[in-house]
Amino acid sequence: MIELEQVSVRFHDRTILDNISVSLTEHRIGVVGDNGSGKSTFARLLNGLLLPDLGTVEVNNLDTRDDGKDVRSQVGFLFQNPDNQIVMPTVAEDLALGLKPHKLTGAEQSHRVSVTLDRFSLTHLADRSAHLLSGGEKQLVALAGVMVTQPQILVCDEPTTLLDRRNAAHVMRLIGELPCQVIVITHHVEHLNDFDRVLVIADGRISDDGPPGETIPRYLETLA
């Protein structure tokens, strides 16, 4: 569970998020909002990539300010651009890199990588150069690179923005099937219809919160 209590984030003279208090407990949660609304800042708070100026963010009773390393071991983060996450030459090497802090034996590491590659249908790309893959393949590698560490929570910040419709649907289907808690920040509201809960962020505050069948239509009305 992620708990935000009276959280505010400021940048110079601008307030990005203003006094947000919310508990995130559902299995699949979507977050939507206009560009500049603060939703990406909200996402980065959830695993300690960004610390609040005021208030607290806790993950399973761990404070992101005091327990950042432990928080990040529990909360995986998938960026919009997979090139920001893929750093090793080959796909298999990139997945293995994420396991270094886990102090696994060589056999355990190889098994974890193999199982994860198979899970995301990437086995045939194991020895390929990760940076020469298609956009959809890269995003799958980035997702696999996060999930190989077996996080309890996955936060995705606009994971389909750079993908075509087919690849976006495929990535979102895989994300939706994950056993861990998933929080997806997106402007593609059509991907959130089957989610348990959708938050709407506007002007740095949560302006709506509830089932997607209720919040999404209200949000779309504001865009008309």
Image (cartoon, grey):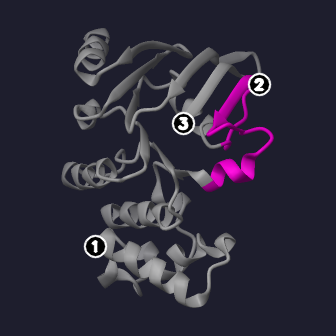
Which residue corresponds to the image point at 51% horizontal and 74% vertical from the top-left? 95
Q: Position of residue 165 (x, y in %)?
A: 21, 48
The 10 Å Cα crowd at callout 3, few under 14, some 14 to 19, many 20 or more, is: some
Q: Is residue 80 left or right of residue 101?
A: left
Range drawn in magenta? 48-73
Residue 147 at x, y percent in the picture: 46, 62
Which callout, 3 or 1, points at the residue further toward the start of the chain?
Answer: 3
Q: Residue under circle 3?
A: 1
Q: Amino acid at mark 2?
A: Asp
Q: Residue at x 49, y 30 (%)?
A: 24
- Furthest-left residue in view? 166
The label on residue 21 is none
- Sequence-first tag of 1 and 2: 2
Query: At label 3, which amino acid type do we have?
Result: Met
Viewer-proximal residue, 127 or 83?
127
User: Can residue 150 be seen at all in this image of the molecule?
Assistant: yes
In the image, is residue 96 above or below residue 199? below
Q: Residue 164: percent from the left, percent from the top? A: 24, 51
Residue linked to disc 2: 53
Q: Is residue 64 above or below residue 215?
A: below
